[in-house]
Amino acid sequence: MYQQAIVTLPITPRTSPKLGLMFIPFIMDILGKKIGTKRVLGLNVSGSKLFGQDVEKHAQGYINTNSWLGIIPDNVWRDDQKENIYWINMFFQQLQADGYVVKDNRAVLRCPCRVVEMLATADNMSRKKRLYEDVLGVMYCKICKSPVIKEIDTVYLFKIPHFQPIPGSIIPSFTHKEVLNLAERFSGTELLISRSRPSAISLWTGKTHVFLDVDFGWQLYLPILRRYGFDPFVLVGSQENLFGCYLMLLLQHLIDNESSTLVVPGYCRTKHLKDEAIMKTFQEWNHNAVRLYLASHVTFRKKELVMDTSLISLTNQVAQYGIRSKLQSPQQSLLESLDAFEGYVIRQLIVAARRSGEVPEQLAEIFT
């Protein structure tokens, strides 16, 4: 028996996270409570963003920040869990048997430290730009500072088939159109999923070890969660990693023939204050004031939203008011919850609370 769950995409944790890293688990927390399902926080700790850093310090610091905000998930999944390897191996063999994973010779671009390792094609290079820089026409690894060279090697590839998520499975609708565009653009593209250096994912084929790209590992997140007894019927994603979200939905379809609803909030950015300044202010607040401020900026109607810094002191003030009532609200559907959770609705309630001097029930639901 599977337990329905709202899950976040795997997030790279930070000891002192930026504001944007808190939105996704916050939305998971609110929606999970409104709908009455399990909540799963996914962490991507094996990727290049934490290369050479204290992973445990970042992971624990991020979990602590979530806990301070009242976000205590039912399960925390990490891409470095040892038990994941068994299932990744099973899925790798299944995808290989079905013809989606193939072994072949390809031209590969590599640096000496192997942090940069990608197919020598424009489509594959474009998604790895954070790992290298172009200096007078020569690519250099940002880690070892050495030039990137081309080699011919035997590698494992994931061949992206044509796949379009079903209508209504991605919210909002304009994000659904973007995902469909990604599906058309990358249909037939080959992704390099093996690595020449040891990685966190080592599979034994019966003849040799295959080291897999850790990104491919966390993209198998949804079928892995299903093996742990969860039905990830809602995935809270990110505008910044829409392609990764698409690959998760695709792999879920290929492996389990299942479909999750992808919910992607608008990306919030600050205009006058830096994230660090806002987070420093938040540390002086009651955590419910921070939850109220985050809720006032959640949107599924825009791709991007500029944070209203004028609300900082107002939300802190309103959070101190007495609560008019906090009745046990009936469980809602996903669409009902999203309509009630739109940021402009929350902002109207905050202004009304300021006038009345007490917190209405709708805002009280955000508090812990």
Image (tube, rainbow, N blue to C red):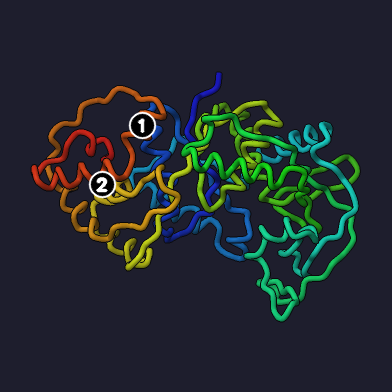
**Residue at image location 33% in from the left, 57% down from the top:** 307
Image coords of residue 138 (percent x, y): 75, 76
Q: Which of marks 1 and 2 is nearer the N terminus?
A: 2
| 40 vs 161, nearest the viewer | 161
Image coords of residue 12 (percent x, y): 53, 54
Q: Report which residue position mark 2 lands on.
A: 288
Image coords of residue 186 (percent x, y): 71, 46
Q: Which of marks 1 and 2 is in front?
A: 1
Q: Residues within 10 Å of mark 2 (few under 14, many from 20)?
A: many
Query: Under tag 1, what secondary structure?
Result: helix
Res 218 visible: no
| 186 vs 258, nearest the viewer | 186
Query: Under tag 2, what secondary structure?
Result: helix
**Residue at image location 69% in from the left, 47% down from the top:** 185
**Residue at image location 85% in from the left, 42% down from the top:** 102
Q: Which residue lies furthest to the top in this view?
A: 1
Q: Residues within 10 Å of mark 1 (few under 14, many from 20)?
A: some
Amino acid type at mark 2: Asn
As drawn, 68 above or below 148: above
Res 241 visible: yes
Q: Residue 337 carries which label?
A: 1
As drawn, 244 above or below 110: above
